[in-house]
Amino acid sequence: MSDNKHKQKKIRWKSLPDKRGYYGRFGGLYAPETLVPALNELEEEYRKAKKDPEFKRQFQETLSKYVGRPTPLYRAERLEKYLGGGRKIYFKREDLCHTGAHKINNCIGQILLAVRMGKKRIIAETGAGQHGVATATAAARYGLQCDIYMGKEDMKRQELNVFRMELLGARVITVDAGSRTLKDAINEAARDWVTNVENTHYVLGTVTGFHPFPMIVQDFQSVIGKEAKKQIVSAERRLPDLLVACVGGGSNSIGLFHAFLEDSSVSMVGVEAGGKGIQTGLHAARFAEGSPGVFQGTLSYVLQDKEGQIKTTHSVSAGLDYSGVGPEHSFLFETGRVKYDSVCDDEALQAFRILSETEGIIPALESSHAAAYIIRCYKNLPEGTLCILNLSGRGDKDVRAVKDIIKSEES
């Protein structure tokens, strides 16, 4: 631990990524030549927008008046009591954002960029459907055409979100290739963008992919941690001891972690999908069994075989069912700044029920993985530990799937 802290002191977290889009050795721009001009244009326009007071005003005003920020920091006292007490748990309530998850923060920012660049059409990928809903919502708000790519398997699991996207005026395009999940939806969206770069902006939903997307999404989602930092100091007069968030591509976790990276007293845990157990191979735990490789535009940890072929993943949660992870997470893992662990399907489903029954909050299955980690480790934490859990989304979208799972287990 002392070695990691020593390393961390030498890292200027706020200066990352570097100009080439790298977090240490991870990241970069591994893209077809036809996409490079569009990516360069996006980076140039984003760097200008970051310095533009009017763009910043528009973004902040929309987050406040449309998204509903700041989201509350809520103390889960009944959950604490259920777990035995002695440690404090706060939820950062991203589930209370308009559309029901943190995804809208990034979508508003990117679509304001698209408008600034004169793009008339928006495309996106989605797994759990929350990014698709948020993109369709923001596109409707600004009057842009919107097409969403979604794997056939995820569409079955998330029928409600498919209908929500359609209600918002988006066209949901079924992806029937590969594992028919998030990675395949990203592939199809990237192919579309290559063909239509002149009039189309691709709203990538997480902190992975070609540079500058990890940087852009990191910046737009960092509002989560900035708010949480002010709120916890106001409530407790000190910084938290522990931050916990689920990690699929990794946007909600980076959103919470980023503001605290230079605070060495704050520990952080990213929770991956353990699926049916690491030993079964049916999981999406990149740091448990993955290795560095180039996947979908970036160098990061990937679940791959010895020949570099991408492995099939599994999770009860569509939003965590992904073979890769954001390059910043890979850097945080290798430096030791963030610890990564995994939670299996059964634990996540149990946490889904516990939060519902103790706090009257039905969490997304993604967020349930983070909650399950807290539940598992609660009694092993030192007395007086102060935790923040990022409740990244609400579970309305998952109720039918969970009901079907419970029915199948009972029959």
Image (cartoon, rainbow, N blue to C red):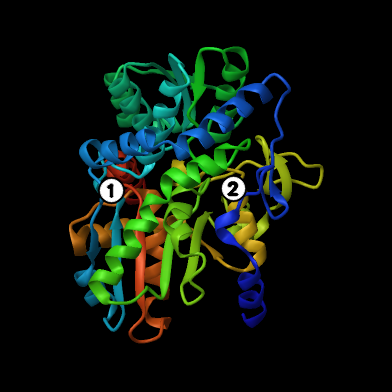
Choose top left, top right, bottom left or bottom right for residue 2: bottom right
The residue positioned 60% from the left and 58% from the top of the image is 278
In the image shown, does 371 or 73 lie closer to the viewer? 73
Image x and y of residue 375, in percent: 36, 70
Question: Which residue is tagged 2?
Answer: 325
Q: Nearer the viewer, residue 303 or 258?
A: 258
Q: Which residue is mark 1?
A: 95
Q: Quadrant of residue 335?
A: bottom right
Residue 206 relative to residue 71: left or right: right
> On the picture, is 82 further left or further right than 22?
left
Place of residue 164 in the rendered image (x, y in percent of width and height, measured from the top left): 29, 26
Q: Secondary structure at mark 2?
A: loop
Does 196 appear above or below 245?
above
Position of the N terminus, as image quadrant, is: bottom right
Residue 404: horizontal and vertical position, in percent? Answer: 32, 41
Q: In whole angstroms, how far apart are the C-alphas of marks 1 and 2?
A: 22 Å
First along the sequence among labels 1 and 2: 1
**Residue 223 shows in the view:** yes
Quarter assignment of residue 134: top left
Q: Residues within 10 Å of mark 2 (few under 14, many from 20)?
A: many
State the image coordinates of residue 410 (x, y, percent, origin top left).
Answer: 32, 50
- Residue at left offset 51%, top offset 48%: 248
248 over 184 or under it: above or below: below
Q: Eyeballing the image, is 141 above or below 293?
A: above
Give the amino acid at mark 2: Val
Q: Residue furthest right?
A: 307
What amino acid is at disc 1?
A: Asp
| Contact, mark 1 vs mark 2 (Cβ under 8 Å) | no
Q: Residues within 10 Å of mark 1 (few under 14, many from 20)?
A: many
Is residue 350 visible in the rendered image? The answer is no
**Height in image: 356 above or below 34?**
below
In the displayed structure image, the side of residue 147 where residue 98 appears, left or right: left
